[in-house]
C-alpha cells in the first residue's frame, strides 16, 4: 500500500526547531523503515509510561508497512520557551517521486493544553 508514495523522509517543525534532528532515510520499497516502525511500536509504552511487554501493539514490520504506516514524532523534549508561546507546527515530508493524486494524510496532535484548531483549506491554525 505505502510503496506507491515513495516516502524518503519526514519530520516535524515546531517554529524553527526540527524533530527528529536527523533524517530517517526511509525506503519502503527496500524495507528500510526500522526507525519509523520502532517509534510507532514504542509510542504507547513511552506515552503511557507502561512496560513494553504490556503495551506492545503486536504489529509485525510488514503489516506496519502495508497496513499501518503511522509516523510518531515525539516532541515532548522541547524548550520551555516553546511551551509558553503560540507554536507553528508543520509536518514535512520528502518523496522520491510525485505523490499520486488524491493521496491523503492525517495528523493527530496530543497536547496537555486545550486547543481549538481552525482550518483554512490547506492550513490549520490555533484559535485562542
Image (cartoon, rainbow, N blue to C red):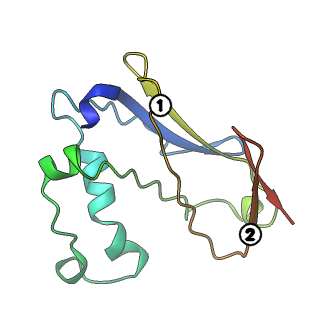
Mark 2, secondary structure of its residue: loop
Q: Earlier in the sequence, mark 1 or mark 2?
A: 1
Please name the residue shown 16% across and 51% down the image: 63
Does the CB distance between marks 1 and 2 fall below 8 Å?
no
Q: Residue 29: x percent and y percent?
A: 19, 27
Q: Which residue is mark 1?
A: 102
Mark 2 neighbour density, 10 Å: few (under 14) some (14–19) many (20 or more): few
Please name the residue shown 26% across and 55% down the image: 38
Of tags 1 and 2, the one toward the viewer is 1
Q: Residue 55: x percent and y percent?
A: 25, 79
Mark 1, secondary structure of its residue: loop
Residue 115, disc: 2
Q: Is residue 58 left or right of residue 105?
A: left
- For residue 118, which quarter of the picture? bottom right
Q: Residue 19: x percent and y percent?
A: 52, 47
Residue 69, disc: none
Task: Locate the N terminus by quadrant.
Answer: top left
- For residue 45, which quarter of the picture? bottom left
Q: Is residue 77 left or right of residue 114?
A: left
Mark 1 neighbour density, 10 Å: few (under 14) some (14–19) many (20 or more): few
Task: Locate the C terminus by quadrant.
Answer: bottom right
Q: Which residue is nearer to you in this view: 113 or 125?
A: 125
Q: How many marks?
A: 2
Q: Is residue 51 left or right of residue 113?
A: left
* Residue at the extreme right: 128
Please name the residue shown 20% across and 83% down the image: 54
Q: Is residue 102 left or right of residue 88?
A: left
Image height of 11 relative to 93, above or below: below
- For residue 97, which quarter of the picture? top left
Amino acid at each position: 500500500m505505502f510503496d506507491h508514495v515513495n516516502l524518503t523522509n519526514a519530520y516535524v517543525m515546531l517554529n524553527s526547531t526540527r524533530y527528529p534532528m536527523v533524517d530517517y532515510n526511509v525506503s519502503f520499497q527496500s524495507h528500510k523503515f526500522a526507525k519509523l516502525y520502532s517509534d510507532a511500536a514504542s509510542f504507547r509504552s513511552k506515552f503511557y509510561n507502561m512496560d513494553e511487554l504490556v503495551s506492545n501493539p503486536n504489529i509485525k514490520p510488514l503489516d506496519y508497512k502495508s497496513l499501518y504506516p503511522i509516523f510518531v514524532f515525539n516532541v515532548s523534549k522541547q524548550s520551555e520557551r516553546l511551551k509558553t508561546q503560540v507554536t507553528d507546527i508543520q509536518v514535512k515530508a520528502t518523496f522520491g517521486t510525485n505523490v499520486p493524486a488524491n493521496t491523503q494524510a492525517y495528523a493527530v496532535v496530543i497536547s496537555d493544553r486545550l486547543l481549538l484548531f481552525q482550518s483554512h483549506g490547506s492550513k490549520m491554525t490555533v484559535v485562542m
